[in-house]
């Protein structure tokens, strides 16, 4: 989706969900776990975050389970369970069921005690960070979700990748206004943006990526093959690149070090390779009412968000939006019009169906 | 300090502290409150964050107290006090004593219950965010500190200022390695950078600021007088400007809306003007041991930070650092060599001493 028109070949949400469950149960994932994965992948596609949706089903999940590097039926171990803390070892299972499990625990504790944090270690790619933060909204809570990942980004003035895109997601319930949902990689752009630029034969923008030596590059091929992403704020410190790097490192400290999981060189493996158990998460939930009257808060947050939205845009430019609006609008649209799936992804899904001997995902064209 | 050599006219830390206490008690601030302010301002100057140190003593604090827009002897009101939450109305007093008071409460609760959050409303400029986060370090806790401020930055694609520089600070204790201390404005640069560029007759860098209509500008005068700062990530969405805007808005929601304080248009006043009570804060503290063995965490965080520091730098470039290192090195140096104070600031301090009939701050030249 990034910088591209949505595909005209669509699937209905429920069909996509079913297909993901079929594929994962075919490789021995428990049905309830498969449903968790499907929930998160479908949410990503609905939100227009194609890179984190069904496009990754085979490479990131099915293949790794088949290769035995990710456990289809993991055993979870509770490492800490206190009134306001929970720490989980996910047994190298899929990231989505572990993330949902830990976030449900976090929510339960926050409902009772006002706030709670949780860590997950020895897990795997959990999809979009926003999904878990948004779970808190159904309970009227503020939600927080972070994950580390395989290494894709250099530190400020560094030549070697030391962190992933390490996203931070926060979801805050409002009143009449839809919730505030921030979900941001701590890099300037995602790896997918480099791929889109390469496909279109376009140069990168300054501040996006570096070459093998850590020097800023506008060449998508150099960036993609031997280079790396830059932190949010770009190269060096002039535009605050050290802030993006600082946030990315913070996410790694909370998800990798505090969880007791892997971090630093141990998590430095190729993103699409055959590996398992290198991902950790950090979750939080927080009850507004523990600090302020909830009705007053929601009313005021409506006003705050409307102030942003109603503020004057740059002449000739787009409207001013708040975090979460484009993704919410995509969700409404794609629920109505079908979920767009890229043509190349359809090919991999059909091949996967054939290989796993499951029914294809049905589609239609708009 | 930003982009400039430190001044050769210096003061000793203790003398600077005494002078600040003299000035504030002269305008009727309680001595213990004056000491709190001095602690934070001296820490800023030691860390090399001159813009947040004694340079602001007269304009931001003394003058506003004299004008009666900030209360010299405020009454605090506790709005919420639960095992893991604390909410304070600072009675429109100085921001530093209120911040320290609320952070001490937060720390006490976190020591007992593992984690705690606090809000402060109806307060004033509290100096560097890092100070409060770092208070947690003395107790072996992770500390969090955020503040909103007068409006200086436009939202993505916006022409009108809607948020301040809205910093986020996080401090995390390590083992042998000094703590990880991230303190970042959610704008690309601070207002001070525009002033330095103007003084040097240099153009701004792309991504720093916009003109009165919200269009990107490289002209420091246009940016300073009628323009505004851009969020971290710069103009538009290409380099992630919407992420910096999203973080800035998040800080405003937690510090302005959740605290029950002022936000949106109510906080839109000139930064150096005569106003009071428009600032809110958000604090957090978190005990590592509630989630993971503390010794193991500290040992692993050492390894994590060393991995960053020992990773290869870009050829011909600086070393790779971690958040907090430059400020810690400044502190060590300026404790030894004296605190640098800008020549123009010395003039205002001498005039202030004369006006308040207090002893001057003594100085020496290096």
Image (cartoon, coloured by chain):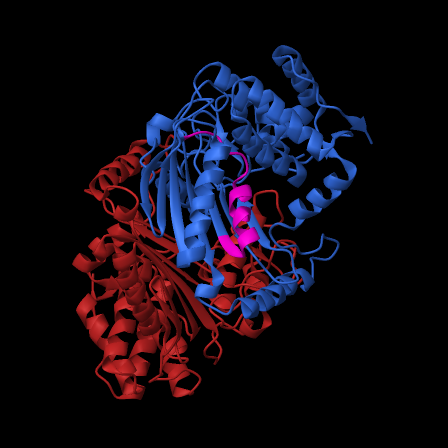
Chain colours: A blue, B red
In-front residue for pair B139/B67: B139
Residue A216 visible, this angle? no
Q: Where is residue B10 in the image (x, y as percent from the top left)?
A: 23, 65
Residue A125 magenta-drawn? yes
Q: In which quarter of the image is the N terminus of chain B?
A: bottom left
Work out whether residue B160 or residue B83 is closer to the camera in this orientation and state it: B83
Residue A74 position within the rendered picture, expressed as x and y whole percent measured from the top left: 42, 26
Residue drawn at (43%, 36%) of the image:
A148
> In which quadrant will I find the C terminus of chain B?
bottom left
Left or right: B358, with B313 as reference point: left
Q: In this view, does B262 lie above or below B153?
A: below
Please check the rendered image and state whether residue A126 is part of the magenta-colored stretch, yes or no. yes
> Which one is nearer the viewer's eye here, A305 or B44?
A305
State the image quarter where residue A98 is shown. Answer: top left
Q: Would residue A142 appear left or right of A255 to someone viewing this image?
A: right
Q: Is residue A115 above or below residue A187?
A: below
Q: In which quarter of the image is residue B18?
A: bottom left
> Magenta stretch?
A123-142
């Amino acid at each position: 989706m990034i910088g591209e028109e949505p595909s005209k070949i669509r699937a209905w949400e429920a069909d996509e969900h079913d297909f993901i469950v079929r594929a994962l149960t075919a490789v021995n994932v428990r049905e309830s776990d498969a449903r968790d994965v499907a929930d998160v992948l479908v949410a990503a596609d609905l939100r227009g975050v194609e890179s984190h949706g069904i496009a990754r089903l085979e490479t990131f999940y099915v293949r790794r389970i088949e290769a035995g590097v990710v456990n289809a039926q993991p055993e979870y171990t509770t490492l800490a369970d206190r009134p306001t803390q929970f720490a989980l070892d996910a047994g190298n299972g899929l990231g989505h069921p572990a993330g949902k499990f830990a976030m449900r625990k976090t929510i339960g504790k926050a409902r009772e005690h006002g706030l709670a944090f949780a860590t997950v270690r020895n897990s795997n790619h959990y999809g979009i960070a926003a999904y878990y933060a948004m779970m808190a909204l159904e309970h009227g809570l503020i939600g927080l979700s972070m994950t580390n990942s395989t290494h894709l980004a250099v530190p400020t003035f560094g030549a070697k990748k030391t962190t992933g895109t390490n996203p931070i997601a926060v979801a805050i319930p409002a009143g009449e206004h839809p919730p505030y949902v921030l979900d941001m990689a701590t890099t300037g752009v995602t790896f997918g943006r480099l791929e889109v630029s390469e496909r279109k034969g376009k140069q990168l923008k300054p501040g996006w990526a570096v070459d093998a030596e850590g020097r800023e590059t506008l060449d998508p091929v150099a960036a993609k093959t031997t280079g790396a992403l830059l932190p949010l704020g770009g190269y060096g410190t002039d535009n605050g690149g050290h802030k993006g790097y600082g946030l990315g490192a913070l996410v790694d400290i909370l998800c990798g070090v505090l969880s007791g999981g892997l971090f630093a060189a141990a998590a430095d493996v190729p993103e699409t390779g055959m590996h398992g158990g290198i991902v950790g998460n950090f979750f939080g939930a927080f009850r507004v009412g523990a600090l302020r009257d909830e009705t007053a808060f929601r009313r005021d947050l409506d006003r705050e968000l409307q102030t942003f939205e109603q503020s004057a845009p740059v002449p000739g430019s787009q409207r001013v939006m708040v975090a979460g609006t484009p993704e919410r609008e995509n969700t409404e649209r794609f629920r109505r019009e079908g979920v767009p799936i890229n043509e190349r992804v359809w090919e991999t899904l059909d091949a996967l169906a054939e290989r796993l001997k499951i029914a294809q995902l049905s589609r239609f064209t708009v």
